[in-house]
Structure formats: structure tokens, C-alpha cells
Amino acid sequence: MRTITIWNEFRHEREDDEAAAIYPDGIHEALAEIFRSEETAAEYEVQTATLDEPEHGLTEEVLDGTDILLWWGHEAHDEVAAEIVDRVQERVLEGMGLLALHSAHYSKIFKRLMGTTCSLQWREDGATERLWVVDPGHPITDGLEECIELPETEMYGEPFDVPEPDKLVLTSWFEGGEVFRSGCCYRRGSGRIFYFRPGHETYPIYENKEIQQVLRNAVEWVSPREGAPRSFGERA
Amino acid sequence: MRTITIWNEFRHEREDDEAAAIYPDGIHEALAEIFRSEETAAEYEVQTATLDEPEHGLTEEVLDGTDILLWWGHEAHDEVAAEIVDRVQERVLEGMGLLALHSAHYSKIFKRLMGTTCSLQWREDGATERLWVVDPGHPITDGLEECIELPETEMYGEPFDVPEPDKLVLTSWFEGGEVFRSGCCYRRGSGRIFYFRPGHETYPIYENKEIQQVLRNAVEWVSPREGAPRSFGERA
Amino acid sequence: MRTITIWNEFRHEREDDEAAAIYPDGIHEALAEIFRSEETAAEYEVQTATLDEPEHGLTEEVLDGTDILLWWGHEAHDEVAAEIVDRVQERVLEGMGLLALHSAHYSKIFKRLMGTTCSLQWREDGATERLWVVDPGHPITDGLEECIELPETEMYGEPFDVPEPDKLVLTSWFEGGEVFRSGCCYRRGSGRIFYFRPGHETYPIYENKEIQQVLRNAVEWVSPREGAPRSFGERA
Amino acid sequence: MRTITIWNEFRHEREDDEAAAIYPDGIHEALAEIFRSEETAAEYEVQTATLDEPEHGLTEEVLDGTDILLWWGHEAHDEVAAEIVDRVQERVLEGMGLLALHSAHYSKIFKRLMGTTCSLQWREDGATERLWVVDPGHPITDGLEECIELPETEMYGEPFDVPEPDKLVLTSWFEGGEVFRSGCCYRRGSGRIFYFRPGHETYPIYENKEIQQVLRNAVEWVSPREGAPRSFGERA
């Protein structure tokens, strides 16, 4: 039994009617439901944490008990305390898996782990996106067709200023004419990191069954192995 | 002064009216013109070689005098002799630069150096392609705008079965809905290899000024350094 | 239940007294014993194949039923038929795991998958080797101390002419003054490949418990996932 | 004419007699001399900066005029102001080359760019080190023999907690039994980074002619191209 902690900024859903309509309990609860479903309920314990909780809900105790952390943030990246970023980074380097979702490309923790600006191009146009499987041999693409089509999304475009991914597994095509490396795998210290582009506060992306499949595959892929040493330097 | 050898299958242009109309002297001569132009004439000596010449024009002597090899092949990959493939591979591993163009993804020499099938999806539809700069810091993209638009091209789509590129510099968007890793950098032995997608026997892709810029940049990037050891194992 | 096929050239052990004394039933049987032991007997079915069998023991049927292939060859690489190399390459690209052991760096199948000469320096000196864990977060190093010490080995030295590994997990130190990248991970097509240096026809390397641990970890790491598509291009 | 800025902590040489004896004017001046020598004097303008100067000598103006930054720090990493680290990181991502030397593996700027702990093993034993050329085709190894032997050095050992290098060019062997990835290439944003292990405050490593050759090659390799865009996102 592994523990997933889903972190959400949880501001749009309380401030913005459109977001509240799609995600009445917050994006974190919508994400949590995916892992509480019958298919994976026996494998994962799911908990949530949000920005406005003390220590953003990410106390030492919570992180010590977390195997996989999902991160969703957008408008309040700056409000995340440096001390918490340090703490999360340390845990990732020790082996905790990290899923950085959508606008988390600009989160402090993702930028910290990448070392780059993580900048990209974007446009809110609600047009079609197709996520193409670039690496059909990768576990994160198990069970997918050759591409996932999302009828309405926000566009993210290259250049995406990240270190060359260890493995690129998904690339997006946008109706408006752009492309984007939407599924990028990294290893930092003992931890695995997956950046996954889809997801937005006002499009119901996380209700899409194929997107849910990628999320389940990705959580599995970033999971630490049971009994693996917690620290890079420490050996039994 | 470095020597570029441009290898072309040279069949379409002799067998097919449409290809002959666009490339009356063969694709190799159109490519040669790019490097014989004022901008680079002082830097490169340019020669050509074609499939139906003895030893496909790639004698030991020719290859010994070649710093950079461009390869264009399509319908007659199978007719390239194994012995010549061995010879070219050996020279690349010793440091000769290789530019694999368009349908050369399926050439024996490219598959030999990659170790994979190099398969991809494709469709002849004459629709628009946009080549996006993924890595604006790479010398191969020097002088480019954020993307190159080609009004009519053949589509190539993912998955492209190649080893993860050392550096991905260009990704294509296609009007019909696909994406493709169109500019891929590799090192094998002492040699640099660049796969560059654009180019077709019946679209005048190589007349496009920005495509020419990429070709010039890429030839520069794959060039061996003067005085570099010819063999990986040999050290002075 | 996954099937391991252990391929061995099986010549030294029949021609050379010293090799026969250490590996009376052949290196393949010594390797097979590791996976037939209590720890893994329930997980793997183990079979062997050798050079002098028809089709080198690697018929279509055998390969179709193989999940992981171990390869040990040394003095007779040239006798492996091109057709069998093609067949093994195809299966690796479709997802079969490959463990290339020791002198298999010069096997046709490993060179085919790498695209390079795979040359290296070597010296038969029977001195000490230490294999250092470079990536303690990698599953192939699970359960290891910080290094494995082998009292007597043949030396392999850099430069090792292979493509940059996707992940370097072990680096060797040799008493005589050399270093070597002894544990290298690759992906080609849907298949995982691990090159593992230790092993020699006249040193009982494969009896070492820690080397056996690496072999078990590596077999697990290269294993295809159940239900994964067999071909890179094919998607359900 | 490119500008090299050599940054040195400059504490050991003022506080410690042994260091002062070897580097009476500071390590920065010893490094500066290498580039002021006849061979490269026409190519580079060399300036220095040290920790105890205002803004550590790295004002906006100095950094704006710097093409390549060398970094040597050891006992006072913590005293480097966060604001200056931000400033240097920004310039590297815009294209400024960075050479991180020896104990700079633990500098704030190197850790920031890597995203990992950059921890390693070490022992001050004054024993022999051999730096093996792992990639003889890389410009940083031009002109070297197969290895560089240093009679007395401090030992650095694996595991070295850094992201997998884009290209590993040198690996060290230590008399005491360890190995280390001593020459590691990275790209972050538009900037090139080279980590180079040798160098110590009480061994005269930087007087070694072959080490000087690597430093010259590395400075050339990390240099930004003339006219390249300064920012990853900005395109002309």
C-alpha cells in the first residue's frame, strides 16, 4: 500500500465561478477520485494538501508518509514557502515520486529540480489538442491508443525551457499550430519525476478516461520501490 | 576547407516527370548549390555521388576525403551494397559528419547507426508543416525564427522508432493533426549525426531559405574538428 | 512466469581445461542455476541455447517464447549467423530484454543494437576489480553495498566505444590503474538492454553472491511488462 | 575577443600557509595566468572576482560582460548571497558558459543548476589519480593522451549525486580504490556547463600542463556563440 499525496493550490475553485462549477471540491478531490476508484483503491491510500493549510499541508510527517506527490499550482506559486520547497526537494531526491501537472511547470519545486526557467509559450483558446504517443514502449503509455484527443484545452507551445528529458513519452499537437513536449520523464537523486501537461482549472480534462489512464500509469512509474534506500548517499 | 559529399539515390528525378521538373539535375545538385553559394563557397568543397555510379560513388578514396556526408535515398535503399554501408559506418565512427535527410530515415546506413527500425507514420497529403524550434540555444537553430512554415509537405508522424536523441532541436506540426521529431542530434563513435526530416522528391523544400539555413547550420555542427583523431581508439 | 533464455557460445568450456574446471557444464548452466535457485524459481522458467545447436538454439519458436535473453560469447562471435542476429534484434526491438555479458560487448547482436564498434582496452592480469555503484537509486543496484570487490578479474578499460548510456549504474576500478563503465542501461525500440562487464571463462565470477544479485536485478529490470505491445509500431 | 571571469572564494590562500605557498596571489590568479599565456591571450580577456569584494565581484555589469565564468569555492559556499546566485543562474541560462571546478560541486550555483544534492565521497590522502578519457571524440579531450596522471590529489568518489551528464568525458581512477565522474557536460537553458574535478588548495594541480589543456578546451566548449540570442525565450 503506497500513499499518494495530492497537493493543490485550491484558489481558482474558491474564487472563480467557472472553476468552481467544474471542480466544486477542488482539483485535488477530482484527482483523488481517480485513485480511489475500484481499479486502484487497493494499491493506494490517497490524501490531499492545499496551499492555505498550515505548512501548506506538507508537514514533515505528511511528507515522510508520502510515496508519490502530485502537484497542481497556478496563480500563487510565489506564496509557497522556501522552507517547504526545500523539504519537498529533499524528499524527491530521497526517492519520493513527483508528478508535476499542467501549470506546475512554473512551480518553485519543479523549477528547483530542473534548474532552468521552465518557461513556455501559451494561449487560452479552447481549441483541440492531440497528445501523441512518442514512446509506445514506455510504461506511462500502456493501454493508450496512438493519440489522445482533447476537444478543448489551453495551448502550451515550445520552446519549453527544461533540461533534455531522460525520456520523452508524449508530444502535443494543437489546432492553432503549435507543438509541446507534454510528457517528460526525469530522474533526480533517487526520485522519479514526470511532467504532464494536460489539466486546467476551467476545462474538465481530468474527467477524460485516457488522461486518467496516463495519471495512473505515471503514478506507478514514479513510485519508489519498496525497501529502496531513502537517501542517495546512504547504503545499507 | 572542408569537403562535403552529397549522396543521392537519383532515381525519382530520372524516372518521374514531376520530380524531374523540380530537380532537373537531381536533388544532389540542388543541395550542392546551397553550399556553393557565396556565403559558404570559401568554407566547403562540394562533390556529389549517386547510387548507380561504381561503388555508389563512395570509394575508399572519396570517403577518405570527405568531412561531411549528406544522404538522400528513398525507393532503392535495398540496392545499397552492405560493403559500402560498412565503409560509411566506419568513417562516421571515425569522425565524419552525417546528415540523414527525409526518407533517409529508412536508409541502411541510418538504421545501422541507430540500431532500431527507424519506422514512422506517413501520409502524402501536401498540407502545411511547421517546424518548431525546441532548442533555441542549439547552433543548428541559429538565425531561425520560432518556426519554419512549409506550405506543402509529406507528413511524417510519431512514433519514430529511434534511440532517444542526444538533443532534440526541431519538432514538426502537421496540418492534418500529427507531430514529429524532425531535427535529432546523435553522437556515435567520434562522429556527429543529424537527422533532418524536410525534403521530398516532388515538393521544392530545399529552395526554402530557412531550410537552407538549417542545412548550413547542421553541416557546420556535424563537421569534424581539424586535427581530431580519426579513430575512436587511437590516441596520439 | 517469465522465460529466460541463456545463450552461450560454449566453446572455451569444451576446449580449454581451465574453463572446463570452473564451468564443467558450461557458463550457461552456471548462469541458469542462479535463476533456478529458490529465490527466483517461482518467477522464471529458464532454458539454454548454444552456438553449435541448429540455428544456434535460437529458433523462431524459442525466441517467441523468450522474455529475457542473456548472451555470453567470446571467441566465436563471427560464427553467429546474420539471420539469427536479425531475428534477435527484431525481438529486442519488440520488447524482449537483453543482458549482454562480459565479452558480449563484441557480439554481433550488441554491436548491431549499439551502432558503434564497442571496442575497449583489455588486459588479462588476474588483479582486483571494484565495481562502484554510481546510481544507488537504480533498481539494478538494489541490495548492493557501495561496491563489489572481485579479487581476480580480466581488466577492461576505457574508452568503451558505445553510445552514451541512458543510465550508467556501475563503474569499475582496476588494481592496474584503469576504469570502465561496467553497468550500462539502454532502450532500443520497446526493449531494454543492460551491458554488464563481469564474467570470464577462467575466473569464477558468476559464483559471487553480489554479482548474482546484480544479474537478478538486471533480469528484472530488462523484463518486458506483461501485456505490453510486442511491436513498437503496433498499438491495440 | 571573449571575456573570462574567474571567480574564487580566496580564503584558503589568505588564511592557510600551505595554500598561500602554492597560490600566493590566489587560485584565481593561477587560473588567470593559463588564459593570459601566449597561446590564448589573443582570444580571451581575463578578469577575476572574489567573495569578499562588493557583490562578490559579480555585479550586473561584470556578468553582462562575461562570456565564460570559472567558479572555485570551498569553505564559504554559504556566504554567497542568494541574489548573486540568482543573477549567475540567469546569465548561464541565457548562454554564459560555466566551469565548475573541484569543490565547486557544492557551490550554491552548481547545486541550483543541477537540482540535486551534488554530494560525493572524499578523502584527503595525497595519493595518485588518473583521469581517463572516456570520450576521445569530444573537443574537451583534444590533445590529451589516454589518461592524465596526477601524483598527489584529494580523492573524490562515487556516488556523485548529479543528473545523468549529457556527456561524460573523463572518469578518475584513484590509487586508494575509488572512481569518479570527473568531467561532466551539461546544457541548461542556452548555457553550457562543465564540471571538472581536479584542483585543490594545497596541491599544485593547475600547474599541470595537461590539466591546463583541459581547462582551455573546456572554456572553448562552454563559450557562447557570437550573436546567439541571450535569452532562451527571445527570438529575433
Image: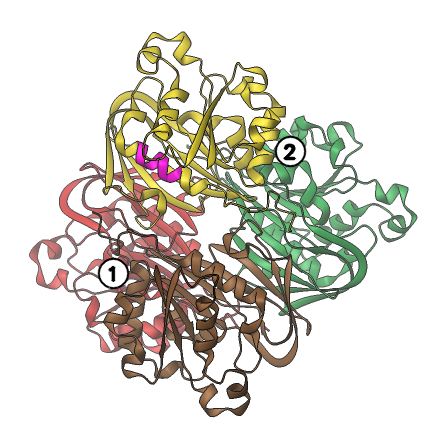
Chain colours: A yellow, B red, C brown, D green
Residue D6 visible in image: yes
Inter-mark Cα distance, 2 to 1: 47 Å
Question: Which structural element holds mark 1?
Answer: helix
Q: Residues within 10 Å of mark 1 (few under 14, many from 20)?
A: many
The residue range painted magenta reads A212-218
The residue at the point 60 percent across, 40 percent down is D116
Q: Which residue is under mark 1?
A: B106
Which image quadrant is residue B96 in?
Answer: bottom left
Task: Using the image, determine if residue C120 lies above or below residue A167.
Answer: below
Q: Nearer the viewer, residue C72 or D148?
A: C72
The total of numbered circles placed on residues is 2
In the picture, the disc for residue D63 is 2
Q: Nearer the viewer, mark 2 or mark 1?
A: 1
- A103 lies left or right of B6: right
Residue under mark 1: which chain is it in?
Answer: B
Residue B51: say if magenta. no
- Residue B95 rendering spot, x and y as whole percentages: 45, 66
Residue B42 visible in image: no
